[in-house]
Amino acid sequence: MGLKKHKRNQIVAGLFAAALITSACGPRPTAGPEILLLPTRTLAPEPARTEPPASSGAARVVTETPRSADEASIVACAAGLGPFASNSALPTGDGQIVFVGSDGNVGLVDPATARAQRVTRDAGVSQESQTGRAYLFPTFSADGRALAFVRLERTLAGYTQTVQVAEARELPPLTGLYATSTDNIPYLDWAPDNRSLAILSINGRTGSLRLSGTDGGASTVVATGASVYWHWRADAGALIAHTDGAADTAANARLSLVRPGAARAERLSALPGYFQAPQFSPDGQRMLYVAQFGDSEALTLADANGTPQCGLSTVADAMYFAWSPNGRHVALIDTPQLLGEPNLLEVIDIGTGRRTSLARNAVSYAWSPNGRYLAMWSVVPDGQVIDPAAVRSAGATPTPAPAATLASTARPALPPTATPRGARPSPTAAPTQTATASGLQFAVRLEIADVSTGALIRVADTIPSSEFLSAAQFFDQYSRGASPWSPDGAARPLSVSTRPVTRPGCMSRGWVRMVAQVQRLAEGGLATWSPR
């Protein structure tokens, strides 16, 4: 019986891994249409930042919208900006946790009572025919009352994927929004008004951003490209979309403002640089993206219509960034690749211009809803794995770095090298490695940083699964639509297994681990918290 369950879990995990690996969200698409390759760049290191922080004052606005990479330049943002926070109050309830169980079904857990509910119960596999059904990528609506997820069915004829929505309760009726036997659907994103769903679908070499009303009407394709990323404005009246990668490698690379119901998207004049997911400010009055200006790139602050205002930071490689929910900080990693590089995670206070280094081997991070805490995953140096039990420790205040300079960064004429999507890059450092059934893996440390005081909470070291590593490459996009934090920002779920060094985000038996205490809530992985 144990062997059969193990085989079943392997097949379910295989269905999940297939959906992740075939994603078309690469940060650096090639000039051609091939979406299964992730080119990387080898660049000279950015010059040391020696300039003092900018003086206080209003943002200096670019007076002319750039029309080409050779014509434009941009100035550094002055201190005194922001915060760009929304007026909505944080919820005070415990909310719910949604997860995909080891059997492939979607479940809910009340963290206060540990009561579990089944949302679906028909997932499973046939050992004889190697067919099966699993549910993937569950995500809460903005009000926490509904769920969207993908039903993945494997038959002898192939795969079928269906986007379904349902109330967040025990065994609700399901409503299908979009079904396909040709596309892959690796990401779902609710509109802030709960009335529609943004769907990433991938067919062959093309990714599409589809909008579908939750009433079951036909979906509409509003953006396409070899890579597709987006973010909703807080009022659900628009999305900022980034398609086809960087302008210096793809002629069709663009930033667009998509207004639901409009006949066509509005192409912005800014030329996109090397990054993935753009983002609106919490109040919807500004946006962030990476733009090319001459021979340099900058993490650019733009107005709500996409017109560049000023630059927050130069970009040497590719930028992974996220605005804090309180509008006061921007976290960023500038790296040629997230996995396999000693990546510096920094936080910029956009009000003072202060720049702080929090981690030096980061692979991903997630803001708490109140914007005070930052959860950080970092590669563990060899021989430094800690006990996986939750351990609270106050760290030293991180060392502030000098303010950013927007001096030009030279672009060497080097051909890109390709890494097949789904392959695990070889770490350049010497991380802790552990032998598993799938080969050598490295340990990842989860820590919580208080950006207001600099104190650190060390949580656990884990051995990441292949699913975690695949999703980590796109954490900036996934974090736009789902959060692992509780609604009040006081706790977070962490899926772990019973091994001495734990595995987060995997389709196997485990618990949900919270920072302040360890409590077994459910078996499964992919746990995320409701917004309310």
Image (cartoon, rainbow, N blue to C red):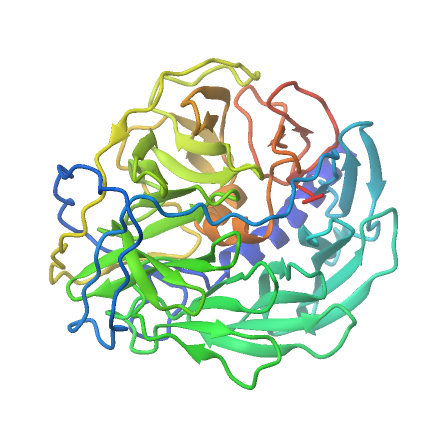
Residue 63 spot, x, y in % from top left: 25, 69
Residue 474, placed above or below residue 272:
above
Can you see residue 496? no
Can you see residue 239? yes
Q: Nearer the viewer, residue 141 or 330?
A: 330
Task: Please state the total of marks drawn on the protein image.
Answer: 0
Residue 56 spot, x, y in % from top left: 27, 42
Residue reaching furthest bottom?
A: 263
Residue 512, placed above or below residue 86:
above
What residue sits 66% from the left and 49% below the top?
11
Quadrant containing the C terminus in the rendered view: top right
Q: Please give left or right for residue 300 compared with residue 518 in the image.
A: left
Q: Please give left or right for residue 405 compared with residue 301 in the image.
A: left
Quadrant containing the N terminus in the rendered view: top right
What residue sits 68% from the left and 72% below the top?
212
| Quadrant in the rendering for residue 396 | top left
Residue reaching furthest front?
A: 57
Q: Please give left or right for residue 388 compared with residue 431 in the image.
A: right
What residue sits 56% from the left and 56% below the top?
18
| Quadrant in the rendering for residue 179 | bottom right
Residue 50 spot, x, y in % from top left: 13, 37
Q: Which of 192 and 474 is in front in this view?
A: 192
Residue 476 spot, x, y in % from top left: 46, 50
Q: Nearer the viewer, residue 372 or 283?
A: 283
